Image (cartoon, grey):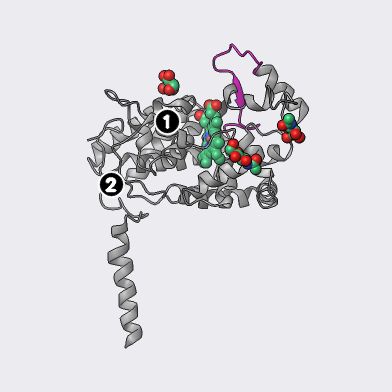
Amino acid sequence: MSSLFFTSLLLFFSLVLLPSLNALSHHYYDHTCPNLESIVAREVRLATANDKTVPAALLRMHFHDCFIRGCDGSVLLDSKGKNTAEKDGPPNISLHAFYVIDNAKKAIESTCPGVVSCADILALAARDAVVVSGGPHWEVPKGRKDGRISKASETRQLPAPTFNFSQLQQSFSQRGLSLHDLVALSGGHTLGFAHCSSFQNRIHNFNSSLDVDPSLDPSFAASLRRVCPARNKVKNAGSAMDSSTTVFDNAYYKLLLDGKSIFSSDQSLLSTPKTKALVSKFANEQHLFEKAFVKSMVKMSQIAGAGQEVRLNCRLVR
Ligand code: HEM
Ligand SMILES: *[C@@H]1O[C@H](CO)[C@@H](O)[C@H](O)[C@H]1NC(C)=O
Ligand SMILES: *[C@@H]1O[C@H](CO)[C@@H](O)[C@H](O)[C@H]1NC(C)=O
Ligand SMILES: *[C@@H]1O[C@H](CO)[C@@H](O)[C@H](O)[C@H]1NC(C)=O
């Protein structure tokens, strides 16, 4: 009798109380927008066919969204009146391809108006960006709501490429993410491009006694210095993040072990035995990297925001 009571109590908690805590669900739009996922996937494929830099942009956009105010679509809002939005804040240099989210939103609004949040569209687009790049597919939990606040000043909360290990650990743990998540998610740097300003600390005036970070492979450092001289005048100069920048693979970890990482933050993953062992594991086994990446992406994509609405246009609050 008492075990039945307990089972009912458990059921009550899991069915009635937990969803009200804003739990996300794989089936959130099953009835209200059954074609959602194919619409988003199509827009990501179309855009990528025209511009190979789109997947990297979408993956980074989702990371930025989740690290500021939780995954609430705040990165998608435009500046308005006196408010400068996140996307116009300092580390915006690589944020682009917002039009992909706009196109997906338009297509979704014409099929299932007013029900799908922009934060969910972005989470799906980031997953599809990995898929079109040859990475793993996974189920994205959905049901996020869009926020109404986006402030350029809050981009200071993002981890910087100059961060050392303890700063990275703190930035991730403040968001409920572990060292395992840190190492797995840094593998997102298998896609995309970095501007000179993001790694110049390693190749010029590293510290008062050395010009170049000695953890960098010397010939790799020399090649970075060639594209990014001390007085760099080329506006969009920089480096690919890894040797196969449009392919989602584990090359990032292999290069990292060879002294060919781009950021100090990447390099710092080698500074503790625990994280270094994970880097080696992911360098040796692509499928272990993929498994870990998927798990950590699902976790990151559930960082709770305080959003309450579903925007009609991802750039504007309702
Ligand atoms: C661990 C802390 C992280 C730091 C310090 C960091 C820093 C950066 C920086 C500085 C850039 C280059 C910006 C530029 O120069 O244009 C960049 C690019 C990128 N980051 Fe990260 N990042 C971190 C974590 C992540 C995570 C968790 C993801 C996704 C899972 C991610 C995905 C990307 C991608 C895909 C790009 C390339 C963007 C493009 O080419 O458009 N990063 N990151
Ligand atoms: C990026 O931010 C800087 C500094 O806040 C701003 O001057 C610039 O216009 C922004 N660039 C883009 C492309 O939004
Ligand atoms: C990491 O950087 C912070 C801030 O600059 C500094 O206080 C700390 O001592 C550094 N930690 C290590 C281990 O270098
Ligand atoms: C410069 O960096 C190297 C390598 O990290 C370190 O051994 C050296 O002590 C640093 N020098 C100064 C003056 O901080």
User: Considering depth in this image, is 163 or 77 the residue closer to the camera?
Assistant: 163
**Overall secondary structure of the magenta section:** loop
Badge 2 crowding class, 10 Å Cα cut-off, few under 14, some 14 to 19, many 20 or more, is: some
- Determine which quarter of the picture holds residue 84: top left
- Determine which quarter of the picture holds residue 212: top right
User: Considering depth in this image, is 193 or 212 the residue closer to the camera?
Assistant: 212
Relative to 74, is 209 on the left or the right? right
Give the x, y percent position of residue 68. 41, 39
Placement of the C terminus among the 4 image quadrants: top left
Task: Indicate yes or no whether the magenta region holds residue 236.
Answer: yes
Q: Is residue 209 above or below residue 64?
A: above
- Determine which quarter of the picture holds residue 151: top left
Placement of the N terminus among the 4 image quadrants: bottom left
Q: Residue at x 27, y 65 (%)?
A: 16
Q: Residue at x 58, y 48 (%)?
A: 290
Q: Which mark is residue 76?
A: none
Query: What amino acid is found at the position of numbered circle 2 in the picture?
Result: Cys
Q: Which mark is residue 33?
A: 2
Give the x, y percent position of residue 109. 25, 37
User: Considering depth in this image, is 249 or 182 the residue closer to the camera?
Assistant: 182
Give the x, y percent position of residue 265. 61, 37
